[in-house]
Every structure is written in C-alpha cells, then in structure tokens.
Image: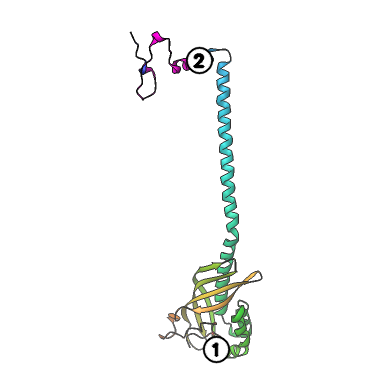
C-alpha cells in the first residue's frame, strides 16, 4: 500500500507522493534526520551555537556600518549647508541694522547720526549719501525732529550666497520726536537689498513698499515715503 507523506511537507504546491517500496525517501526527511544526528553528536550543539553567534556578529557589524554611513551623510549635509545658513542669518541681521540706522536721528549729534546711517551703506546708496552729506545735515537740523525706531518684523526674501547678495523685507515702527509736538509713531515697510563688502553685509538699495502709516499720535495725514533709491536725508516723516 502506498503511504501518503504529503502532510509531512511544508510545500503548498501539489505533487506526487513518493512510494516507500521504491526505496525513495523525501529529501526533507533526510535533512531533518541529518540535523538531528548533528545535534546529538558530540559538539554538535556547540557548532550550531557558533554558527548562530557568527551570524549575529555579522548582522551587528552591518548595522553599525549602516549607522556610521548614514550618520556621516547627515553630518556632511549639515556641514555643507552651514555656510549658506550663516549667510542667511548675517544678511538678515545686516538688513535689519541698516534699516534701524537709517531711521534714527539724535538732534544732539546730527553728524554722528548721519555717519551711523552711512556706515550701513555701500555702492550707489553710499555714494549718494556722501554726495549729499552737508545738505542732509542742514535739513535734519532745520527740521528739529528726532527719530528712533524698532523692527516689528523682518524676513529674507532672496539669497544668492554665491554672489553675496540678498534682499529682505523689514517692517519698522518709527517714532518722531519733534521739539514742539507730541511724539508720533509710523509704520514703515521697506525692501532692503544688501551685498557683502569684505566680511560685512551692507545695504546697497532701499525701496519703500508703501506709504508710511500713522500708528498713533501726530496728525491724521500720512507722511511722504522716502525716495525709492535712498533713505530720507532729513528724517521728518510726519512734518
């Protein structure tokens, strides 16, 4: 009688059952028997444990190599992006500082205030300020209006770190301090183009994106915006 051995096999594919009368023994049975004899033989268990240990060690080495490789990749990415990140932060800080310097006026030291503004300029903007330095000083003294400012918000809008150029949107609160009138607050919205000169970023162009807006105090009428190609030579936006 032919014995049915298919239930002893793991395969799900249909196949003809071997006949023991033919002297054919399934290879799976032979393999299992050999494994059992190996385990029962002296030192067999030790061999199996050694093989398992070696396999675990190889897996651990592979995992460590992968971790080192991908970790190094993250480090390389961070290092390669670091110069651009530094340029982004430095350019934005320079734009903010330039806007503050150009909207500040100490009537007790008009030449010093204008010199501070010029220290944040470069290119054609600086050339224009230098050319009109005396006129700007005279107008500032005649206006009798001091100014101080603070940054309400800012963001870098473009950055070309390869060419050392960037643009930033800077929103300022500018406070007028006239001698014979109450203070008045205005909101300025500027686009500041900066370029790197040596190791320092400076403003090379200032553009007013809107008319200054009266926030408090002063008169109901908005002041005139400064020229698009330069900051106000005599800072008196509400007069």
Q: Which residue is mark 2?
A: 34
* Front residue of 77 and 3: 3
Decide if residue 163 is on the left or right side of residue 219: right
Per the rendering, the mark at residue 84 is none
In space, the residues marked 1 and 2 are separated at their CA atoms by: 105 Å
Residue that protrudes farthest toward the left in the picture: 1
Name the residue at 61% across, 83% down. Answer: 114
Q: Residues within 10 Å of mark 2 (few under 14, many from 20)?
A: few
Which range of residues does the magenta coloring cover?
7-34
Residue that protrudes farthest toward the front in the picture: 22
Q: Quadrant of the N terminus?
A: top left
Q: Is residue 38 above or below residue 180?
A: above
SS for dot 2: helix
SS for dot 1: loop
Residue that protrudes farthest toward the right in the picture: 198
* Front residue of 93 and 217: 93
Q: Which residue is mark 1?
A: 144
Name the residue at 55% across, 21% down. Answer: 48
Q: Is residue 150 above or below residue 109?
A: above
Name the residue at 40% across, 10% down. Answer: 22
Please state the horizontal and vertical placement of residue 183, each as a whole percent of the image: 48, 82
**Is residue 90 among what the camera can see?**
yes
Name the residue at 60% across, 69% down. Answer: 164
**Is residue 109 among what the camera can see?**
no
Please state the horizontal and vertical placement of residue 219, each as a whole percent of the image: 42, 86
């Amino acid at each position: 009688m032919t014995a049915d051995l298919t239930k002893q096999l793991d395969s799900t594919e249909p196949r003809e059952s071997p006949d023991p009368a033919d002297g054919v023994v399934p290879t799976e049975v032979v393999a299992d028997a050999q494994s059992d004899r190996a385990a029962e033989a002296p030192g067999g268990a030790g061999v199996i444990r050694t093989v398992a240990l070696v396999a675990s060690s190889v897996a651990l080495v592979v995992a460590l190599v992968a971790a080192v490789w991908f970790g190094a990749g993250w480090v390389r990415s961070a290092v390669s992006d670091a110069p651009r990140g530094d340029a982004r932060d430095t350019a934005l800080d320079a734009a903010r500082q330039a806007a503050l310097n150009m909207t500040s006026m100490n009537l007790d030291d008009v030449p010093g205030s204008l010199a501070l503004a010029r220290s944040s300029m470069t290119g054609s903007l600086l050339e224009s300020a230098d050319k009109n330095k005396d006129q700007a000083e005279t107008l500032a003294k005649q206006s009798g209006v001091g100014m101080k400012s603070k940054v309400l918000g800012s963001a870098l809008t473009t950055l070309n770190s390869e060419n050392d150029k960037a643009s930033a949107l800077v929103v300022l609160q500018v406070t007028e301090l006239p001698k014979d009138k109450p203070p008045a607050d205005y909101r300025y919205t500027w686009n500041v183009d900066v370029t790197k000169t040596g190791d320092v970023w400076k403003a090379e162009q200032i553009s007013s994106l809107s008319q200054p807006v009266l926030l408090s105090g002063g008169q109901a009428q908005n002041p005139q915006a400064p020229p698009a190609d330069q900051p106000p030579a005599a800072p008196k936006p509400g007069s």
